[in-house]
Amino acid sequence: MVFRLYVYDHCPFCVRARMPFGLKNIPFDLRFQLNDDEETPIRMIGKKMLPILEGEDGFMGESLDIVRKIDGISGPALFSGEPDQALVGWMRQWGTTINSLVIPRTPYPVFAEFRTQEARAYFTRKKEEIFGNFDDLLSKTDTLLASAEAGLKALEPLLPAQNSVSIDDIMLFPLLRSLSILPDIKLPDSVRDYQVGMAERSGVPLVRDLRASV
């Protein structure tokens, strides 16, 4: 049986689960789920959460568990071990700023899970409960963008090596891929090169490339 992976295209945790398939050239069946579809994931794993991996032994949730599962079925293990703690610290420091920029821009039909108005409304309602009113967040774009761009400069010395892959890539790339929803963000050259290169190697297209294809 070919593995089947159920995801939301916008979701960084789902991007994590997609990456080992591309980086290790393992065939799989990618399925995008509407964001307001609660019944399907609850039937599979008992809660409304993606990614979900379906294989011969049933269903599996949790992105890093899926990464380890796929890493173990072909070739040497590439994603074992612990991520670089300085990189983890950077993600913790700047994650809220990045989310405040990305989340209010997310519910748009460029992502397959938001092709219906109901799915977009569902996402907006749920995320505004956590992050606050989307219009308020959008009104802070200039301040948030300046802060994020300063954070991206601080990322440069922490970037994973481009001649290999590791758990650091699984942790970092999904966040940088999310930032590609912002067409005007200024990335340092090394960060942009990493973002573009990892998108090509993992087979997970950047958001700007999704826009160009529709």
Image (spheres, helix red, strand yellow):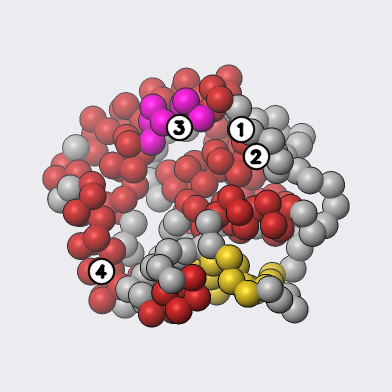
Report if the CB atoms under discs 3 and 1 are less than 8 Å apart: no
Q: Which residue is mark 1?
A: 83
Mark 1 surroundings within 10 Å by alpha-carbon count, few (fewer than 14), some (14 through 19), many (20 or more): some
Image-based side of 198 in relation to 212, left or right = right
Q: Which residue is mark 2?
A: 167
Q: CA distance from mark 3 to mark 2?
A: 14 Å
- Name the amino acid type tagged 1: Pro
**Image: magenta residue range:** 88-95
Report if the CB atoms under discs 2 and 1 are less than 8 Å apart: yes
First-in-chain label (3 vs 1):
1
Mark 3 surroundings within 10 Å by alpha-carbon count, few (fewer than 14), some (14 through 19), many (20 or more): some
Q: Which residue is mark 3?
A: 91
Q: CA distance from mark 3 to mark 4?
A: 27 Å
Percent position of residue 197, x then y: 65, 43
First-in-chain label (2 vs 4):
4
Q: CA distance from mark 3 to mark 1?
A: 11 Å
Report the front residue among 17 and 60: 60
